[in-house]
Image (tube, coloured by chain):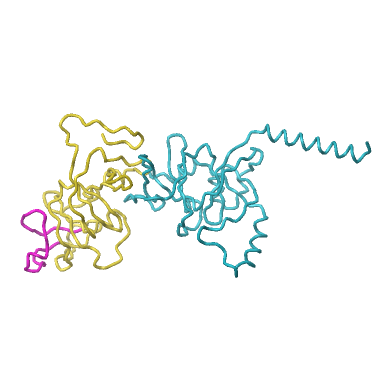
Chain colours: A yellow, B cyan
Amino acid sequence: MFYNSSSNTEPKMSGTRPSIFEVLVFCVGETWLVIRAHRIQRLMAYTTAAIKPGAPDEPIFAGLLGYFEPSGLPEKKESFSPTLSGKLARFPVLALDKILELPAPVAEDAYKQIICMEYNGGTIGFAIESALEIERANVADVRVLPSWVENSRTKPVVWALWQRSPDELLPLVEPLEAVSGEL
Amino acid sequence: MNNEDILKQAQQRESEQNAAANRNEAKVRLLLFRLGEEWFALEAQQVREISRLGKITRVPLTPPHIMGVLNLRGQITAVVDVRPALNLPQAPLEESARVIVARHESIEAGILAEAVVEMLEVPKSALSDPSHAGDAEHGKYASAIITRKLGNQPKEGNQPKPEAQKEGQKEGQKKDKDNIIVVLKLATLLDALKVR
């Protein structure tokens, strides 16, 4: 399906399958990663005040930082910048570096943004350090992971590599695949 | 011709015969590299290329010995740090560090080397039983060992200072002793390091 690492032949795109898709390039755990943009509901600022710890009977997610509470946000709307409009409701926020087993940020205020995604009919947030703009990726620049590093843990979460430039490879991740638990 | 001449002639003949035997003996080419203070080798036929570290992309959810992936002219190759498997300290990497891209059957991986030293050609008879490899971990991944006098390669950018000359002379004495080079069993090593 994608440009295979064991071959230097570019794939032929068949039918009406789009050859371009949108991605968000972001940084977490000192690592630059890419996520497909179509499942992102919004990208918003991470404010400690808005993240409240969950009650003891709350479902437990690995890497749970707390629950986003709209009431915790300051009145000024400029304090966050959603990429999509929509009503803000309470949702869990997870540390993506922990989920992806990346180095934990050294600074306490390392998390600057939250990637909000649809999950089980609700929203789930992933705290990240920074994000660039949405970029357009060509399917021909998507490369499969070497079979050597691929296993049942990496495969669904890190599903490919995006060759952003001749000497830059970025892992394409699907963090929802690493989440288990009820909202 | 006196007895001494006869003896000399016999010795010369024997020496020529030994040299001829060596020329005819099957040889093996080895790529010699350094990890920490230890010397290792891979069979040259298993080595596809040697590359600088370049830009390694870390892959989430992989174990620490997987350093990441490297794009080598379009070929995406996993790079592994074999030092933990060989029970060696993970010292910071210097300019001399290289990736040895090695292949065994369908498995290909980049193996980290702190320095790649030279290509050796040795007669097969020079390869000894790996059970003599000092460290148990080395023995596990060794197909053979060879002993050879090696110059202690100074690390790049770390040339000895004049005041260290005396120390250097002591080091010089060490250079004259035989070093043990562990020839790695690539298949076993790669199999142990593969992500499962």
Left or right of A151 on screen, residue A45 = left
Q: State the image coordinates of residue A154 (x, y, percent, origin top left).
A: 31, 46
Q: Quadrant of residue A97?
A: bottom left
Q: State the image coordinates of residue A16 (x, y, percent, origin top left).
A: 15, 32
Quick check: is A89 in the magenta stretch?
A: yes
Q: Residue at x 56, y 54 (%)?
A: B38
Single out the residue that lies furthest toward the bottom. B163
In the foreground, A57 or B122: B122
In the foreground, A113 or A120: A113
Q: Is residue A115 above or below residue B145?
A: below
Q: Quadrant of residue B76?
A: top left
Q: Residue at x 20, y 52 (%)?
A: A181
Left or right of A59 on screen, residue B136 = right
Quick check: is B61 in the magenta stretch?
A: no
**Which region shows up in magenta?**
A68-93
Q: State the image coordinates of residue A129 (x, y, percent, origin top left).
A: 24, 60
Q: How many numbered marks appear?
A: 0
What secondary structure do most residues of the magenta stretch adopt? Answer: loop
Q: Quadrant of the N terminus of chain B?
A: top right
In the foreground, A180 or A94: A94
Q: Residue at x 15, y 56 (%)?
A: A43
Single out the residue that lies furthest toward the right. B2
Left or right of A140 on screen, residue A123 = left
Left or right of A48 on screen, residue B140 = right
Q: Quadrant of the C terminus of chain B?
A: top left
Q: Is residue B88 above or below residue B165?
A: above
